[in-house]
């Protein structure tokens, strides 16, 4: 039986350091002391759900063998899953040009792979799919697929369901909303929008920690990794640039978030092609 407490306490310095070390080891997240009140706020509900009286008890749990499942909840709570449809629209315009570069090969039966790394609730991957479907009327006949991954299993499950509350649909023009989504109501009578089969058939959702070994064997022509690496320290970012280059085909495109940059792109075998846009160099 869980013990409910009125107050779960404050995040003490020792517990903060222990949580910060675990978050970095598990997911590469860099937590700074300036964010301690935010971290405390996000984790406090986990203490209440578990019936724990203080953060020291919570730290003991997440560092124990029995705390493996709770470590996932911790990372989920600390990860900001803020997303929206067609965020940073210039990248989707650039995506059309990338597709045009590969179009002759697509028409000849060759494949094209796009990766949404850090897909959150799925809006980015769906924005990619809508852009492609609008640009390529015969997309169902082409070997073009989207991989959408995130470290948070909860948001991956949400994205797989493909059902979005009305408040999530900001940014989708009405004509696209009616074309690619089905308006319905959930069990509570609230308006929701279900993603149509045409889009869902293009996307494969899966869990992936960017700091772990990447199981994908095929390379990608385009990678979206936006507003993800901003949470990593410089050393981790440097390692990821090299991994992204290895995951891209020659001349493949990498799109980052609005406040993210590759430090010294040439050293990492990238060239700058536009606002937070890069191309993988050969050699």
Image (cartoon, rainbow, N blue to C red):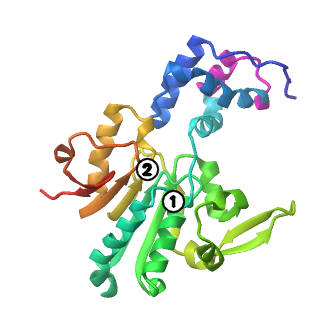
Mark 2 Cα-neighbour bin, 10 Å: few <14, some 14–19, many ≥20: many
Residue 63 location, quadrant: top right
Mark 1 Cα-neighbour bin, 10 Å: few <14, some 14–19, many ≥20: many
Task: State the SS at label 2.
Answer: loop
Residue at image mark 2: 226
Position of 87 with respect to 56 (left or right) is left
**93 or 58: nearer the viewer:** 93
Residue at image mark 1: 124
Q: Position of residue 156 (x, y in %)?
A: 59, 55
Q: Residue at x 51, y 61 (%)?
A: 86
- In the rendered image, the residue lying farthest to the left is 283
Q: Answer yes or no: do the residues labelled 1 and 2 have beta carbons within 8 Å?
A: yes
The first of marks 1 and 2 along the sequence is: 1
- In the rendered image, the residue lying farthest to the top is 13
Q: Quadrant of the C terminus?
A: bottom left
Q: Position of residue 200 (x, y in %)?
A: 58, 72
Q: Position of residue 154 (x, y in %)?
A: 64, 49
**209 or 192: nearer the viewer:** 192
Q: Which residues are magenta?
A: 49-64
Q: Residue at x 52, y 20 (%)?
A: 34
Numbered badge on residue 143: none
């Amino acid at each position: 039986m869980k013990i409910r407490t009125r107050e779960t306490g404050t995040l003490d310095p020792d517990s903060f350091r222990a949580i910060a070390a675990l978050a970095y080891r598990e997911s590469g997240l860099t937590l700074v002391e300036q964010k301690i009140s935010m971290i405390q706020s996000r984790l406090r509900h986990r203490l209440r759900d578990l019936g724990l009286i203080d953060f020291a008890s919570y730290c003991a749990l997440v560092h124990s063998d029995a705390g493996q499942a709770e470590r996932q909840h911790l990372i989920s709570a600390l990860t900001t899953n803020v997303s929206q449809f067609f965020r940073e629209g210039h990248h989707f315009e650039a995506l059309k040009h990338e597709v045009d570069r590969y179009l002759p090969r697509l028409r000849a039966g060759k494949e094209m792979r796009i990766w949404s790394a850090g897909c959150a609730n799925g809006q980015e991957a769906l924005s990619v799919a809508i852009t492609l479907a609008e640009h390529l009327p015969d997309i169902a006949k082409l070997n073009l697929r989207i991989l959408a991954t995130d470290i948070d299993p909860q948001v991956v499950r949400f994205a797989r369901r493909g059902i979005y509350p009305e408040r999530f649909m900001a940014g989708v023009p009405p004509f696209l909303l009616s074309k690619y989504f089905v308006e319905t109501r959930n069990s509570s009578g609230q308006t929701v929008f279900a993603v149509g089969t045409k889009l869902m058939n293009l996307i494969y959702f899966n869990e992936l920690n960017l700091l772990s070994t990447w199981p994908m064997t095929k390379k990608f022509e385009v990678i979206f990794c936006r507003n993800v690496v901003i949470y990593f320290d410089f050393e981790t970012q440097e390692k990821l640039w090299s991994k992204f280059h290895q995951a891209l085909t020659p001349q493949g495109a990498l799109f980052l978030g609005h406040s993210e940059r590759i430090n010294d792109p040439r050293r990492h075998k990238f060239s700058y092609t536009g606002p937070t846009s890069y191309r993988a160099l050969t050699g």
